[in-house]
Image (cartoon, rainbow, N blue to C red):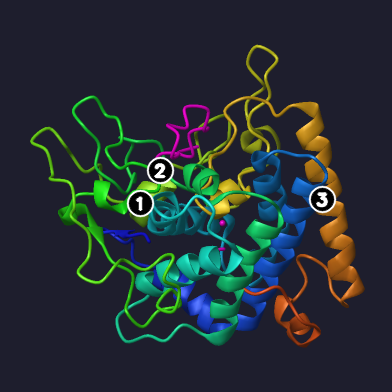
Amino acid sequence: MTMFPINIPPMPPEMIEAIQANPEGFGDAMGAGMEAFAAAMEGGGDMGAAFESFGDIAGPMMADLGVPQEMFDAVGDMVGAAVGPAMMMGPADAGGPEIGAMMHDAVDMMLPEGMDMPGPVADAMMDMGQGMADAGVMPHDVAGEMMTLPGDPGYPLPVDGAGDPVVVPGDPASCPADACQPPPMDGAMADMPNVMPPEGGYDHAPMGPEMVMPEPMTMDVAMDAGALQPGTDGMAPPDPTGELSGAENIAPAPVDDVAPPADMAALGDALGGNPADEPAPAEPADVADAAIGAAMDAATDQGGAPGADAGANADAGHDDHDGHEPEEDTDSVDPSAGIG
């Protein structure tokens, strides 16, 4: 049993156009990304390393479909704002089909009214949920990584006067009625009693006088929340004229021997996850590299490679388809630095 946030972010038209033009390529990108995610988790990495592995594979494949890296990361934040609350309010032991159904319905609710989700996209969402379950990650933990921090722009649920979340993990009734909405009655979750609200709904907690809703997640908010937006965090501004070269386009040197963040293609970015604010430990980085290599090898075995025409491998098969952490996830890294 769970609920979705009332302010579901709309899917950007540019992403919709890219998906409609090549839904099979989108599914391939998500499938390859999830293979890297799973490999990183199986190799002993943490979720941050798995997120990075996903993005390092899926991001370039989406770029080949016409989705720039910045947009891919921003849309991931938006998807996280849509599905993160459902995962967080849902059962802590939700299985793969339930996680996938939540992802399916969240993305479906982001699409324009009357638009049917392409089959490969629907399959990709369901398979991503199963892939997460197979990798051993729990929905509440994923939710904490997919959403921005409580009180930050784009956080999809209300906070109290101190800026703390008011929604209790695993308890949809703790979400005030004005802040939440039920899953679609005809969605993928409809046949799953464990995640659908009971008949008659919940006895929702009231919206207290000091409760506030942070700024909704929009494309502008998501772009501002990116880890490596142009001109910030050590990244040099882009050169739209193409006239600059050399030092003008090189990021500033590391400060205090700490290098700037290396990659904003993390699944944390791609699925609204949290980018690392500090240099990643050596072990997760090694795991991420190994996972990326394994996923690239797998893509090559299928007759293509990450970065090649994703649609060319559609017939080869693909994995179907990226609140505050339920236990007050204070260790969660701020994703404001960036479908799964």
Task: Check disc 2 and report its element: helix, strand or loop.
Answer: helix
Name the spot of residue 262 as percent of width and height, x first.
Answer: 68, 36
Q: Magenta stretch: give its range.
A: 322-340
User: Residue at coordinates 57% horizontally, 63% vertically from top-left?
Assistant: 340
Mark 1 vs mark 3, foreground winner is 3
Dominant SS of magenta comes to loop
Quick one: label 2, few (<14), some, or many (20+) residues within 10 Å? Answer: some
Q: Is residue 52 magenta?
A: no
Name the spot of residue 37 as percent of width and height, x first.
Answer: 71, 53
Quick one: label 3, few (<14), some, or many (20+) residues within 10 Å? Answer: many
- Residue 16 or 229: which is nearer the viewer? 16
Q: CA distance from mark 1 to mark 2?
A: 6 Å
Q: Is residue 45 visible?
A: yes
| The image quarter in which residue 297 lies | bottom right
Q: Is residue 231 above or below residue 215?
A: above
Q: Quadrant of the N terminus?
A: bottom left
| Of callouts 3 and 2, the N-terminal one | 2
For disc 3, the marked residue is: 291
For disc 2, the marked residue is: 224
For disc 1, the marked residue is: 220
